Image (tube, grey):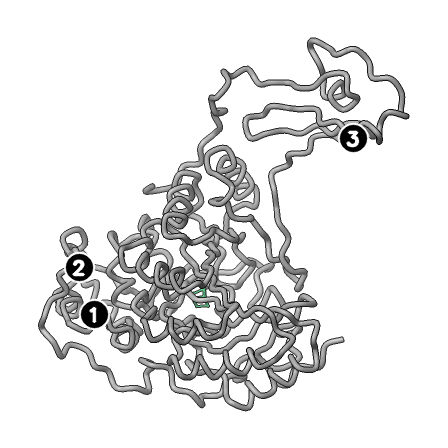
Amino acid sequence: MLEEVEEPNIGLLEKEIAIPGSRSEPSVAGNSSSRNSDLDLTSFDKVLSPRFRELSGASQWTDWQWQMSNRIRSVEELSEYFPSLECGADIVAASGKFPMAITPYYASLVRKLDESDPVFMMSIPRDKELWNPPFLREDPLEEERYMPVPGLVHRYTDRVLLIATSACAMYCRYCTRKRMTGMRESCISSSRIAKTVEYLSNHPEVRDVVISGGDPLTMSTGNLEKILAAVRAVKTVDIIRIGTKTPVTLPFRITDELVAMLKKYHPLWINTHFNHPREITKESAEACGKLVDSGIPVGNQSVLLKGVNDGTDVMEELLRGLVRMRVRPYYLFQCDLVAGVEHFRTPLSRGVEIMERLRGRLSGIAIPTFVVDMPHGGGKVPVLPNYVVSVSPTHTVLRNANGMLVSYPEPYAEISGLGELGPMRESPSVWDLASGNASAIKPAIPDGHTRQVRAFPVDGK
Ligand code: SF4
């Protein structure tokens, strides 16, 4: 039985620890004129303003706190960075309901100021966020129902999720926690950390603590360490995991100082959140490389997003890029039923079809598990193409990505008492495979060739 939630989610995070670069801190923008020679401005300077080029040339460009302080937070700032973008009533209304924040670094990845651009889609507010069919909810996963301590979600027996902050470097327009992220940028208080530790100490079945948010790496290294040290002191906790998008939106956050601190709390794992190959840059690769070099396994959780990554080619490019960075594709999530994200949702069958085609193209280490986080707090379920066609007491009929059907016999000792196997058929049916009277049905394509399948067009890809 879970204990009662003490408080509603909004307001559970007390502003005890300042977020570097939050509005309460003074900005340090524009106080240097030296240029960052690594930054290639040629391909996007048509859409970005002199203001942006001035900031991107600052010596602090690679300073993560400078990036946090210079996030685009208002429609006026958005206009300064993208003067040719029409910041009409739609953007004003959407950013009024769901906060906006974009690091200058992430903004520099925009190439076109319209919905054909995946970075634009994921970061710029649109009025589509304000329209909701009736089945969308603010908290479809019912996280708040599973909070025995405010900010601590205990849904699965051996795992908990700790919401350590409501702040992120960038507010993804499709975020599952749109109800809280950025509404009031604040971090977990010392008293909440103490309550969390007390709960973990009283629940030795919890072996795995996921520190999430918001984005925990928007906190200062010292304040993040307070949480890690407290959780690590609970003897029954085996693994600590951190969920962070900073390698994607703020790669400069992965500093030597941070990595040296994280290494003290092994076994520690990190899951990051790349959705599109555009996000894989020299900077993000360096950030992931630092983490992996320090012995931290890095996984990736993507969300399947309409118009962003809902095509096999773009997904394959993303997955190959992740593996090259030594980041293991972990989950591909079906977009949650969150209020404000209907325009990002794809049919569930789209994900299944993409997964099926990927299986024929990529090795297993590059293929994530496609999951649906079920509404009503049902938890994650993997959704797979159906490779088991039929099952009989003696044989299972399996199908591969090319459509080839194969009869797989049970161990001889299991089936020898079930009667004689008949002669092998030359033109078998699925029943012949299931009953062991044939061993395979091959599609009419040459060996080594891949089945041609219908392609989903993705605009602009
Ligand atoms: S970084 Fe994560 S928590 Fe923050 S807005 Fe993006 S998806 Fe949501």
Residue 390 lies left or right of residue 368; in this view the side is right
Question: In the image, what residue type sits under mark 1?
Answer: Trp
Residue designated by label 2: 39
Amino acid type, label 2: Leu
Q: Which residue is mark 1?
A: 61
Name the quadrant containing residue 12: bottom right
Mark 1: give few (<14), some (14-19) or many (20+) Cα within 10 Å: many
- Compare marks 2 and 1 and give the one earlier in the sequence: 2
Circle 3/circle 1 CB separation < 8 Å: no
Q: Is residue 6 visible?
A: yes
Q: Which residue is mark 3?
A: 411
**N-terminal label among 3 and 1:** 1
Q: Quadrant of ligand 1?
A: bottom left
Q: Is residue 208 above or below residue 381?
A: below
Q: Is residue 248 visible?
A: no
Name the residue at 64% across, 24% down: 405
Q: Dot 2: what SS?
A: loop
Please state which amino acid type lies under the numbered disc 3: Pro
**In the rendered view, does 156 fall on the left or right side of 31?**
right
Q: Mark 1: which secondary structure?
A: helix
Find residue 134 and name its label. none
| Tag 2–tag 1 contact (CB < 8 Å) | yes
User: Is residue 137 depicted above or below 181 in this figure?
Assistant: above
Which image quadrant is residue 434 in?
top right
Mark 3 crowdedness (10 Å alpha carbons): few <14, some 14-19, many ≥20 = few
